Amino acid sequence: MCANRRASLYPKARRARLILPPEASRIADDIRTMRIRGAGLIASSAVRALQIAARYSSARDAEGFVNQLSVAARVLLKTRPTAVSLPNGIRYVMHRVNEAKAKTDSVAETKSAAIKAADDFIELTRTAKERIGKIGARRIRSGDVVLTHCNSSAAISILTTAWKQGTKFKAFCTETRPRFQGHLTARALASVGIPVTLILDDAVRYFMQETNTVLFGADAITANGALVNKVGTSMVALAAHEAHSKVFVAAESYKFSPETMIGELVAIEERNPSEIISKEKLAKLGRVKVRNPSFDVTPPEFIDLIITEQGIIPPLGAMLILQDVFGVLTPEELREYQTYRIDET
Ligand code: RUB
């Protein structure tokens, strides 16, 4: 039996368990099933799982170690397709592992480079969110009415920081169907005392007349400054544009997509229709198809500012962040980035 044939006999999750140590495999499952969700947490959790795989590796030389880790990286990359922070986190670690391997054959040294890189990335995600909170809080003013969509820890960091600094404002949170992540945002904002009103996604344009600021998180920012975020974001941004409300995006620099510098598109995840309607109810509708994209793309024209941990940029400044984080890609680096792409795994 050839290797491919044997592999295809295992269901996906079971195969992942064979490649990743159990603790890491659980993290992969949690990302896949959205027990772990939100682009920032997806990235730091996947990197944590990669670190666990590094620790458990029984490879005898640096090359074997890197090969094992690359296989683990590929499994993790497949867990969710849209959050660019995930491949960027994996690349952050693998780039440093490859650099270490270029200098030494020692498996111990290569392993410790992997463990350190993972710790560094996780720390980066923590400090970036804190900085975004501080930088973004300056853009929220007393009397503002801020509308949020979905559940972004970076956006929450801005609003809770502003509130704790004494800025008095109100918030509208959309429910964010079909998975109601807006409830999480409403709870987080209300828990620090912010007056919150939960609204239907469909009521956004109705309430836009009372709103002066819209704040989104990001799953990805493209080279031209477009935002990929929870489905519905572009409709909210369109309503804000029409009403002349400000649109801010909170996005850590590792959410900027390097592939889009060379014209690639960000993959949009389509989830199971059962999140929208049960099989039984659907059957009663007759011959009806259901589609459930989880994200959409908001053009840069509808965005006023992107708040990153490096400072605030207009959407057309996205390239500055990309060049700062990734540099101008040499053909060799480009090959390495493309190794850790979601859709090629
Ligand atoms: C979550 C979502 C969030 C971004 C940013 O979608 O769209 O706005 O991921 O979140 P899902 P954060 O629930 O499908 O993962 O700022 O926490 O990284």
Image (cartoon, grey):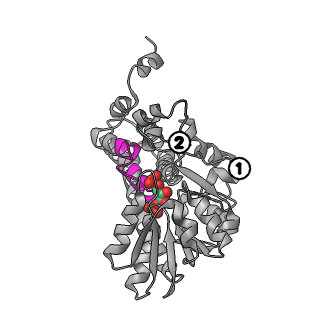
Q: Is residue 141 inside the magenta stretch?
A: no
> Amino acid under label 1?
Ile
Q: Residue sitting at 54 percent across and 59 percent down? A: 255
Q: Secondary structure at mark 2?
A: loop
For this orientation, the residue located farthest to the left is 22
Per the rendering, the mark at residue 142 is: none
Side (left or right) of 304 relative to 286: right
Q: Is residue 101 above or below residue 16?
A: below
Side (left or right) of 200 relative to 242: left
Q: Is residue 33 inside the magenta stretch?
A: yes
Q: Secondary structure at mark 1?
A: helix
The reply to whether callout 2 and callout 1 are in contact (CB within 8 Å) is no
Q: Earlier in the sequence, mark 2 or mark 1?
A: 1
Secondary structure character of the magenta stretch overall: helix
Q: Residue sitting at 61 percent across and 76 percent down? A: 246
Residue 117 placed where, x, y %? 42, 55
Q: Is residue 237 above or below residue 283?
A: below
For disc 2, the marked residue is 270
For disc 1, the marked residue is 262
The boundaries of the magenta stretch are 28-46
The residue nearer to you, when weighing 226 against 319, is: 226
User: Viewer-nearest of labels 2 and 1?
Assistant: 2
Residue 213 placed where, x, y %? 56, 76
Q: Is residue 251 visible?
A: no
